[in-house]
Amino acid sequence: RERVLSGVQPTGSLHLGNYLGAIRQWVAYQETYESFFCVVDLHAITMPHDPKLLTKHCLETAAVYVAAGVDPDRSPIFVQSHVSAHAELTWLLNCITPMNWLEKMIQYKEKAVKQGENVGVGLFDYPVLMASDILLYQAGLVPVGEDQRQHLELTRDVARRFHDKFCKKSSSNKVFREPKALIVDGGARVMSLTDGTAKMSKSAELDNSRINLLDPPDVVVRKIKKCKTDALQGLEFDNPDRPECTNLLNIYQAVTGLDKDKILDDCADLSWGQFKPLLADAVVAHLEPIQSRYNEVIADQKSLHEILKRGRDTASDVASQTLADAKHAMGIPPQF
Ligand code: AQP
């Protein structure tokens, strides 16, 4: 079976975009692929973070995976920093990755602008850490949105460069598997509630810009009531001049599972005042079972720790083998 690896950064409370664009898809992948799901805390610290919250956010993120339907008995769930091979392989790969490859990364350029002079080496190196995450597990497929495509391409380039430098003799002694992108099914980007051209994001300042997965029903209703719309008559998908309209209909489609034609039949002539309560009800109903499962999972910290320990052990077994092969290929001395 093909192997899939994916993760979310524990940078705050997870939102509908993280769920619809990533975690919900993972639940389906478990049927087809051997899956590893990681809470990528080493990535999260590439931007300023609060040390008092990081552990809490890691546990909450793992609990959301379980609540959303990831089955830890089938798919290891683990915290990235608990498998030290991630940091170790990053160092090895750093030593063969040209600086100018990383200078071209769009996400780095965008995030670095926000940091000004304080931009850390870790942010620059983010794509190499991501390459390590993927390559350690010999993942053939990586679910990526448009914004991560460039990083996946870099992962392939780094693997190829490693093989060119250290594994020339035969293709059978290649250390890594070159991953391919797994196109996310029906995974339209979920956009901000306050600006239909910006993606919904954990770190956006305005809480009203996102629906957090754990927002109680009254908060969801309030956020949708207040969200940005436009003054045009009727509702339609895909009009580039109406990004908010497209986004809200996309969310409605994702949480109801209805097809576009049915939605247009039902909603094309509605006013915002009529559509918003429908949308709010559908989102609340969709989140309700996830939230009640989450409350059970997070309340049982002992079991949650156990899940992460088991995940770490399974992940470590795979990762340490790849790391050992990489070290061997590079001529790093074995432990005497
Ligand atoms: N708005 C979104 N719509 C669809 N998918 C999304 N994802 C994130 N936002 C949306 C997907 O969630 C996964 C995990 O993302 P991440 O936490 O690693 O980082 P991110 O993409 O940068 O997510 P955020 O929420 O915007 O976090 P911050 O604010 O910390 O940067 C990925 O698969 C991503 O595609």
Image (spheres, grey):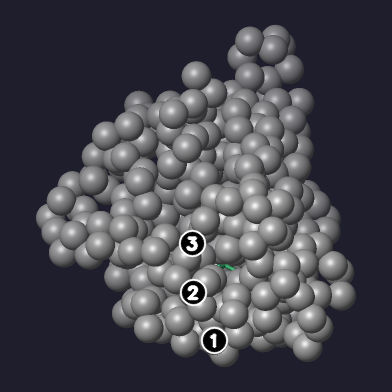
Q: For the residues carrying marks 3 and 2, which lies nearer the camera in this image?
A: 2
Which is more toward the observer, 44 or 253?
Answer: 253
Query: Residue 324 placed where, x, y %?
Result: 46, 28
Tag 2 and tag 1, C-beta contact below 8 Å: yes
Circle 1 — which element?
helix
In this picture, residue 210 sits left or right of residue 53: right
Mark 3 or 2, nearer chain start: 3
* Element at label 2: helix
Is residue 127 positioned above or below 332 on the image? below
Left or right of 190 in this view: 5: left
> What is the x, y in percent for residue 52?
32, 79
In the rendered structure, which amino acid carries the disc numbered 2? Ala
In the rendered image, which residue does mark 2 sit on?
Answer: 280
Residue at 29% of width from left, 40% of height from top?
A: 72
Residue placed most toward the observer, 243 or 233: 233
Q: CA distance from mark 2 to mark 1?
A: 8 Å
Q: Position of residue 244 (x, y in %)?
A: 72, 76
Residue 269 higher or lower than 101, as above or below = below
Q: Secondary structure at mark 3?
A: loop
The kind of residue on which mark 3 rests is Gln
Q: Residues within 10 Å of mark 3 (few under 14, many from 20)?
A: many
Q: Quadrant of residue 330?
A: top right
Quarter of the image where one finds residue 314: top left
Quarter of the picture holding the C terminus:
top left
Q: Measure the alpha-carbon separation of dots 1 and 3.
A: 29 Å
Instruction: Give the residue number, with chain letter if any, for mark 3.
Output: 9
Q: Which residue is mark 1?
A: 225
- For badge 1, the amino acid type reads Lys
